[in-house]
Amino acid sequence: MKTPQLLLFLLASATLFAASNLNAATTDPVGYVTQTSTNGDDTVLYPQLLSTPDLTGSPSAISSGQLTIGDSLETNAYALSHFVLFCDGNLQGEWFQVVSNTASSITVAEDLENLGATTSDNTKLIAFWTLDKLFPGGVGFPGSADVTDPVAFILTNNPSATGTNFAPGNSYFYHTGEQTTEGWYLDGDFSGTIGNTVLSPETYFTVRNSSGQDVSFTAAGNVPVDLLATNIGRLTNGPQDNQLVNPYPAPLSLDDSGLISSGAFEASADVTDPVDLLLLYDNEATVGTNVAPSKTYFYHSGEQTTAGWYLDGEFSETVGADTIPAGGAFVVRKANGSAGTVKWSPAIPYVGNL
């Protein structure tokens, strides 16, 4: 069994700063989350917290993918390592990776102007979690003395993959320095350390631990106080798995998940033949590697029994109070249909208590 995660908030002021330009850090609540990787198991994880914003406020001008923000930036300091999060407006909850910056502007690949961004939008500039930031010096992760036989891996997902039942994307391990420079490496490539590898905020990762011991690590950072959005996609020629997370450090009930109200999850008229499925992973309930989801849910639209969330194959009662754990991993398996994506931005389950 996995050791339950421990969440302790060290609450600071929850005041949101809304300046006319991006030029100061916020004072969002801070805290830390401790999670455990159990020996012999795959553990699906997500940091749940954010790096302290480098800048926050509203741009003075927007042109295509460029935000003009004054003269307070260090030139070329944020490319690929940071993202811009929109806290309100048309793009609320959406984030965009920085591709370049000057002393007075930040540029992303997408056309923010065309997408509906405005100068009244509040935004934050936030650093991605990386391997080095999440496990500095390898602390909290089982180190490997032999680069050809690592004892533990971080297995990442590929958010662009199509189809279902995906194999892991890239695999990373931490070498303790006996054979080459200490640090993070891509499995099979020992040419250089890659600790600056970004961990995507839109999906979970898996720790595969065969080191012989359980290991715990702690992520410290800012408690999310802004909506965080993810696009959920569908294909025309077959089902599509979307590897998702509850991005918040508190449980999120199915009823409050926003999956139905957003249109990201399709209700099923026939309880014996569901359309979209939610496949939930539970670190507490599963052991071993390449684990299957522990529960499968669907949403019934009410033609045959009470409308609501049900466990697949069990129609005796609705289970909308069931939760996706804090930082919990799940898959939305979309049935084929009109290709496209729908934005999913679940309500923050604790915002009224900060």
Image (tube, grey):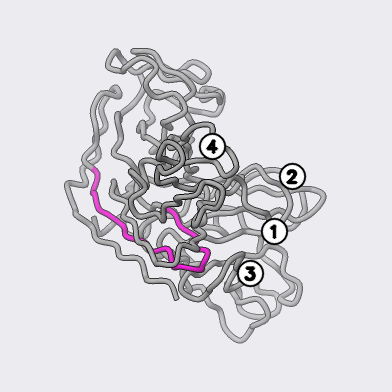
Instruction: Find the magenta span and give its range.
Output: 28-46
Q: Name the residue under label 1.
A: 165
Q: Distance between the Cα atoms at labels 1 and 4?
A: 29 Å
Residue 288 position in % (x across, y down) = 56, 71
Q: Distance between the Cα atoms at labels 2 and 3?
A: 20 Å
Residue 123 position in % (x across, y down) = 37, 32
- Magenta span: predominant SS is strand
Give 15 or 73, whichever is nearer the viewer: 73
Q: Mark 2 points at which residue?
A: 339
Q: Distance between the Cα atoms at labels 1 and 2?
A: 19 Å
- The mark that comes first in sequence, 1 or 2, is 1
Q: Mark 4 points at which residue?
A: 190
Residue at disc 2, secondary structure = loop
Q: Name the residue under label 3.
A: 298
Q: Distance between the Cα atoms at labels 2 and 4?
A: 40 Å
Give 334 or 153, whichever is nearer the viewer: 153
Amino acid type for the residue under numbered disc 2: Ala
Would you place residue 119 above or below residue 188 in this image? above
- The mark that comes first in sequence, 2 or 3, is 3
Q: In which quarter of the image is the C terminus?
A: bottom left
Q: Residues within 10 Å of mark 3 (few under 14, many from 20)?
A: many
Residue at disc 4, secondary structure = loop
